[in-house]
Image (spheres, coloured by chain):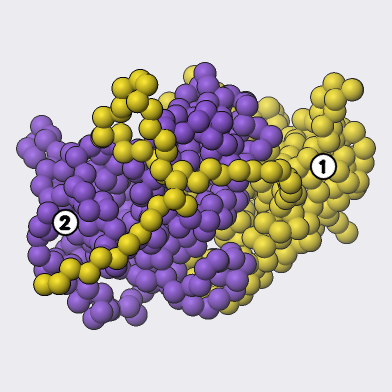
Chain colours: A yellow, B purple
C-alpha cells in the first residue's frame, strides 16, 4: 500500500486577476521506507511542493495523504530539514533538539528524554559540540543538528528541502553520505528536494524530475538501482550510473526544460571593428569612420630577400 | 599561424606578514587563435591569479603576456571578462550596462549601430524581452547572461571567464554553458576559462590545463578534448570517451595535483565528486606524454618581443 500519495495537486500564487500557476496536476506515490529525490530547476516550485506535504501550504486542487490520512496542516509526524537550518540561535545543540523531544514525548522521564537527545547528537557525530550554540558551528554542523532534530521527533516521514544547498562541495559530499547512511539505518521514508542531479543519484532510491515552471509537473520516475553505500569513485566507472545520470539530465534539459522561446526578430549586427583606445581620439570635428571588416583589403606582397 | 596568446614564465609573489608568498611560479602557456582553453585546479592554486594578470587587474611579478603581438601592460577592452558574479551597475538596465563598454570601443560608429550591437548580443543570450530591466529585476542566471553579452559585445581579442557559472545551481549552469557555447560558436573568440567543474571544462574546452596545488602552482598536465564541434551535451554524456576523460581529470585533481608537488593527497580542501574517496591502488600512473609536455613547456625559451 502506498504510504504518501499526492494526487492531482495544483497550486497558484498571486492576486486573482494575475495568478501564476506554479504546480499543475502533480501526482506522486512513495512507498514506506523509500528514499525519493525530486530534482528540478530553482524557482520551479520544488519547495512549494514540499510545503504541501509538510502542511505549511494547502493545494488549490488535489489531495496529499500520508498513511491514508489527508494532510491539512503541519504536524510532528513529518520532520522537515530546511536549507537555512532554522535553529534557535540562543539555544545550544542539545537544547534545540530537546525543544522538539520535550514537546513530543512529555510522558517520558527527564533522563529518558535527555538520553534520546544525546543518542541523536551522537548519530550525527556532534557529541563534542553538544553544548555549543549555532553561531559557534559551521554550516555543515548546523545542518547536522537540523537533521538530528528532525529525526529525534521520530517522524513517519522525513522531508529534506535542499538541505545541502548552502554548503561547499566537500562538506556537501560528506553530508550526502552521512544523511543517506542515517536515513537507511533509521528505515525512514524520505523525500529530498534538490537542484543537483548528482546529489539525487548519490542519495535516493528513485529520482522524480520536476519540469521547469510555470505550471511545473513531475516527469517519469527513474529508479536508482545502485548498490549502497555508494562510492563516488567507483560510480564514475559504473555504466549504470552514467545511464541514470544521462536520463535525468536529458529529461530536465529536454522535455522538462524551459520551453525554448523562439523569438523571430530582425537583428542587425553591424560589421564594425572595435577601436584601439590607446590611440588618441581625434578632436571633435575630425570624426573618423569605423573600420568595417567588409572594406578591409588584404594584399600579399612578396619581398625578394 | 603563430600563437594568439603567449604567457611566458609568469610568476606572482604576494607579500604576507610571514614573508613573500609565491603563488604562481613559471607559468607558461600558448593559446592558438580561436581556441577555448580551461584552467582547472583546486581553490588556492593560483588559477584566478593568472586570469587577473591576463585581464590586467593585477601585475605579474615576473614574466609577461603577449596578446596578438602586443605585450599586455594593463586592463583594456581588447579582453572581455566575465566574472563569477556579474558585477552589473545596479542603476542601469541590462541594455545600458552593455552599452557602457560598446559606446567606448565603437565610438566612431553611429549611435544606431552601437545600439544594434548591444541588442544583438542581448537577444542571442536569451534576453530579448528583458533587456530594459535593471539587475534587481533579473534572476541570478539572467544577470550572468548580461555579463556574457557585455563581454562578447566588445568584440574582444580574447575572452576571459573567471568561474563564470560558479554561483549558479547545476541546472541553470547547464543552460548557461549552452548559451555561452552557442554564442562562442558564432565567432570563436579565443577564450581562457577558470573553473573547478570537471564537466564544464570538458563540455566547453578544446584544451584543459590542469594546475598543481599551490603555493608555487604550475601547469601540471594538459588534456586535449577531442570532441567535434558543435557539441551536444546529450551526445557527450553518452560517449564512453567522455567518461574516460572525466576520470582522468578527477584522478589528477584528487591525486596528482598533490603528488606532483610532493604533497599527500586527500588532505584539506578539494571540490569534485570524488574528493574524499579513498585513493585506489590502481591509480593511473603519470602518463609519459604528460610528463614530456610538462618538461617541454618549462623548456620553452623566454619570449623576445
- Rate crowding at label 1 as few (under 14), some (14 to 19) or many (20 or more) other CA atoms within 10 Å: some
Instruction: Give neighbour class at mark 2: few <14, some 14-19, many 20+ (Cα, 10 Å).
Output: many
Residue of label 1: A215
Q: Nearer the viewer, residue B284 or A203?
A: B284
Determine which quarter of the picture holds residue B81.
Answer: top left
Q: Is residue A126 visible?
A: no
Circle 1 marks a residue in which chain?
Answer: A
Q: Nearer the viewer, residue A110 or A217?
A: A217
Residue B278 appears in which quarter of the rendering? bottom left
Please tell me which residue lies in front, A83 or B69. Answer: B69
Residue annotated with mark 2: B8
Q: Is residue A167 left or right of residue B62?
A: right
| Parent chain of label 2 | B
Q: CA distance from mark 2 to mark 1?
A: 54 Å
Image quadrant for the N terminus of chain A? bottom right
Quadrant holding the C terminus of chain A = bottom left
> Residue B274: percent from the left, percent from the top?
43, 62
Eyeballing the image, is A259 above or below A57?
A: below
Q: Residue at x 40, y 52 (%)?
A: A296
Q: Secondary structure at mark 1?
A: loop
Which quarter of the figure has residue A82? top right
Q: Are marks 2 and 1 in contact (CB under 8 Å)?
A: no
Residue that lies at the very extreme toward the left in this rendered image: B19
Answer whether residue A272 is visible to the viewer in this image. Answer: yes
Q: Residue at x 56, y 25 (%)?
A: B93
The picture places residue A197, in percent across and down from the top left corner, at: 61, 56
In this rendering, the answer to whether A241 lies above or below A139 is below
Amino acid at each position: 500500500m502506498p504510504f504518501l500519495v499526492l494526487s492531482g495537486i495544483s497550486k497558484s500564487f498571486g492576486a486573482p486577476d494575475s495568478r501564476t500557476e506554479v504546480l499543475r496536476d502533480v501526482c506522486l506515490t512513495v512507498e514506506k521506507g523509500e528514499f525519493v529525490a525530486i530534482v528540478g530547476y530553482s524557482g520551479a516550485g520544488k519547495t512549494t511542493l514540499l510545503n504541501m506535504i509538510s502542511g505549511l501550504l494547502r493545494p488549490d486542487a488535489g489531495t496529499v495523504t500520508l498513511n491514508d490520512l489527508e494532510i491539512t496542516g503541519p504536524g510532528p509526524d513529518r520532520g522537515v530539514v530546511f536549507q537555512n537550518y532554522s535553529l534557535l540561535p540562543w539555544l545550544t545543540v542539545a537544547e534545540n533538539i530537546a525543544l522538539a523531544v520535550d514537546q513530543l514525548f512529555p510522558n517520558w522521564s527527564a533522563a529518558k528524554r535527555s538520553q534520546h537527545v544525546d543518542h541523536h547528537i551522537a548519530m550525527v557525530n556532534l557529541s563534542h559540540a553538544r553544548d555549543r550554540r549555532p553561531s559557534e558551528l559551521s554550516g555543515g554542523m548546523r545542518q547536522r543538528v537540523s537533521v538530528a532534530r528532525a529525526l529525534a521527533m521520530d517522524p513517519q516521514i522525513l522531508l529534506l528541502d535542499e538541505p545541502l544547498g548552502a554548503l561547499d562541495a566537500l562538506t556537501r559530499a560528506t553530508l550526502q553520505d552521512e544523511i543517506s547512511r542515517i536515513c537507511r539505518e533509521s528505515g525512514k521514508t524520505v523525500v529530498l528536494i534538490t537542484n543537483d542531479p548528482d546529489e539525487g543519484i548519490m542519495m535516493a532510491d528513485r529520482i522524480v524530475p520536476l519540469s521547469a515552471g510555470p505550471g511545473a509537473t513531475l516527469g517519469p520516475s527513474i529508479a536508482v538501482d545502485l548498490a549502497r553505500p555508494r562510492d563516488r569513485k567507483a560510480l564514475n566507472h559504473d555504466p549504470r550510473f552514467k545511464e541514470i545520470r544521462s536520463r535525468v539530465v536529458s529529461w530536465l534539459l529536454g522535455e522538462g526544460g524551459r520551453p525554448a522561446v523562439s523569438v523571430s526578430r530582425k537583428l542587425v549586427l553591424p560589421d564594425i571593428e572595435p577601436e584601439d583606445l590607446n590611440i588618441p581620439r581625434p578632436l571633435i570635428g575630425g570624426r573618423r569612420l569605423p573600420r568595417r571588416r567588409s572594406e578591409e583589403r588584404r594584399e600579399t606582397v612578396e619581398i625578394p630577400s | 599561424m603563430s600563437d594568439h596568446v603567449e604567457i611566458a614564465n609568469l610568476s606572482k609573489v604576494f607579500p604576507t606578514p610571514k614573508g613573500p608568498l609565491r603563488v604562481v611560479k613559471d607559468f607558461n602557456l600558448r593559446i592558438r587563435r580561436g581556441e577555448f582553453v580551461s584552467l582547472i585546479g583546486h581553490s588556492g592554486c593560483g588559477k584566478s591569479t593568472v586570469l587577473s594578470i591576463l585581464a590586467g587587474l593585477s601585475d605579474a611579478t615576473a614574466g609577461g603576456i603577449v596578446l596578438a603581438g602586443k605585450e599586455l601592460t594593463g586592463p583594456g577592452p581588447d579582453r572581455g571578462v566575465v566574472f563569477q558574479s556579474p558585477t552589473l551597475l545596479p542603476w542601469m538596465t541590462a541594455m545600458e550596462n552593455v552599452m557602457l563598454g560598446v559606446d567606448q570601443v565603437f565610438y566612431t560608429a553611429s549611435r544606431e549601430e552601437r545600439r544594434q550591437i548591444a541588442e544583438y548580443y542581448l537577444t542571442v543570450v536569451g534576453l530579448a524581452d528583458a533587456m530594459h530591466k535593471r539587475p534587481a529585476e533579473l534572476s541570478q542566471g539572467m544577470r550572468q547572461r548580461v555579463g556574457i553579452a557585455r563581454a562578447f559585445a566588445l568584440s574582444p581579442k580574447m575572452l576571459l571567464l573567471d568561474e563564470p557559472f560558479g554561483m549558479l545551481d547545476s541546472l541553470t549552469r547547464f543552460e548557461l554553458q549552452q548559451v555561452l557555447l552557442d554564442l562562442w560558436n558564432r565567432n570563436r573568440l579565443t577564450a581562457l576559462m577558470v573553473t573547478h567543474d570537471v564537466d564544464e571544462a570538458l563540455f566547453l574546452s578544446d584544451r584543459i590545463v590542469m594546475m598543481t596545488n599551490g603555493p608555487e602552482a604550475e601547469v601540471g598536465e594538459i588534456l586535449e578534448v577531442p570532441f567535434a564541434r558543435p557539441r551536444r551535451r546529450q551526445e557527450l554524456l553518452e560517449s564512453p570517451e567522455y567518461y574516460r576523460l572525466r576520470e582522468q581529470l578527477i584522478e589528477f585533481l584528487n591525486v596528482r595535483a598533490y603528488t606532483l608537488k610532493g604533497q599527500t593527497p586527500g588532505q584539506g580542501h578539494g571540490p569534485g565528486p570524488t574528493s574524499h574517496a579513498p585513493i585506489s591502488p590502481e591509480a593511473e600512473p603519470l602518463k609519459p606524454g604528460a610528463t614530456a609536455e610538462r618538461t617541454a613547456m618549462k623548456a620553452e625559451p623566454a619570449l623576445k618581443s
